[in-house]
């Protein structure tokens, strides 16, 4: 379980497809030394398992289902990624509950800057939009954000200067794609209502 509060950035040192998996090696000296083989780590909002670790890097394997639902097929050597270690039960929950289970991909269709902040409009598929509500939560590339409004085919978020400077969200432009995880509570509510 994560909070969507990205604590570090990493850099893709290698991304190789082999046997239906994508083998990722991430250079991340700030958090690699805290990871052990088998630990979870969120990479651009996707919960991955560290299969090998060193003091400066870790390796993870991405399976086909994750590749189909995320932007990982487009990851290349040198790409910067958002990183978050799992929350401890004693941690503050600064963002919202994030599982690292990506629901789909959204594409930036408009940006607007003002007073150091930025608004982003993102086009998303119906299977993502149906769970979004204004003033609700969404995770974009693992970053917990508040939704400003939801339209028929898109939604809007507002980004504060700190988030722009400390995560990959600041580099997004029109056409950029991001991993989206909706608030899991919305999915549970829907499931409960279906059973009635």
Image (tube, rainbow, N blue to C red):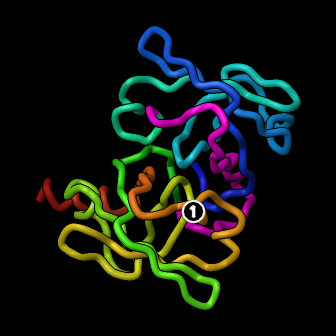
Which span of residues is magenta-colored? 73-96
Residue 125 in percent (x, y) is at 23, 55
Quarter where residue 176 is shown:
bottom left
The residue under the point 73% across, 20% down is: 52
Q: Is residue 191 visible?
A: no
Q: Is residue 8 above or below residue 24?
A: below
Task: Check the picture and name the quadrant holding the C terminus.
Answer: bottom left
Q: Nearer the viewer, residue 179 or 48?
A: 179
Q: Is residue 111 above or below residue 80?
A: below
Tag 1's secondary structure? helix
The residue under the point 63% across, 31% down is: 77
The residue under the point 14% across, 56% down is: 194
The residue that label 1 is drawn on is 169
Please rate how many residues cluster around mark 1, counting C-alpha atoms within 10 Å: few if below 14, some from 14 to 19, many from 20.
Answer: many
Residue 127 in percent (x, y) is at 22, 54
The residue under the point 22% across, 63% down is: 130
Q: Is residue 112 visible?
A: yes
Task: Answer with left or right where residue 169 lies relative to residue 139.
Answer: right
Find the residue positioned furthest to the front. 174
Q: Is residue 55 above or below residue 105?
A: above
Q: Is residue 163 above or below residue 29?
A: below
Q: Is residue 145 magenta?
A: no
Residue 32 in percent (x, y) is at 80, 35
Quarter where residue 170 is shown:
bottom right
Q: Nearer the viewer, residue 103 or 67?
A: 67
């Amino acid at each position: 379980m994560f909070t969507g509060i990205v604590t570090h950035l990493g850099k893709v040192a290698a991304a190789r497809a082999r046997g239906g998996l994508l083998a990722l090696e991430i250079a991340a000296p700030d958090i690699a030394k805290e990871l052990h083989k088998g630990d979870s780590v969120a990479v651009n909002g996707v919960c991955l398992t560290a299969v090998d670790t060193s003091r400066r890097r870790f390796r993870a394997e991405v399976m086909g289902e994750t590749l189909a639902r995320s932007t990982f097929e487009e990851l290349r050597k040198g790409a910067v990624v958002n990183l978050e270690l799992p929350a401890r039960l004693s941690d503050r929950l600064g963002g919202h509950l994030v599982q690292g289970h990506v629901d789909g991909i959204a594409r930036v269709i408009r940006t607007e800057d003002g007073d150091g902040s930025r608004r982003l409009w993102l086009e998303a598929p119906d299977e993502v939009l149906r769970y979004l509500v204004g003033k609700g939560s969404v995770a974009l590339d693992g970053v917990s954000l508040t939704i400003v409004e939801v339209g028929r085919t898109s939604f809007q978020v507002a980004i504060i200067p700190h988030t722009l400077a400390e995560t990959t969200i600041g580099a997004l432009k029109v056409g950029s794609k991001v991993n989206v995880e909706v608030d899991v509570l919305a999915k549970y509510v829907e499931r409960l209502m279906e059973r009635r």
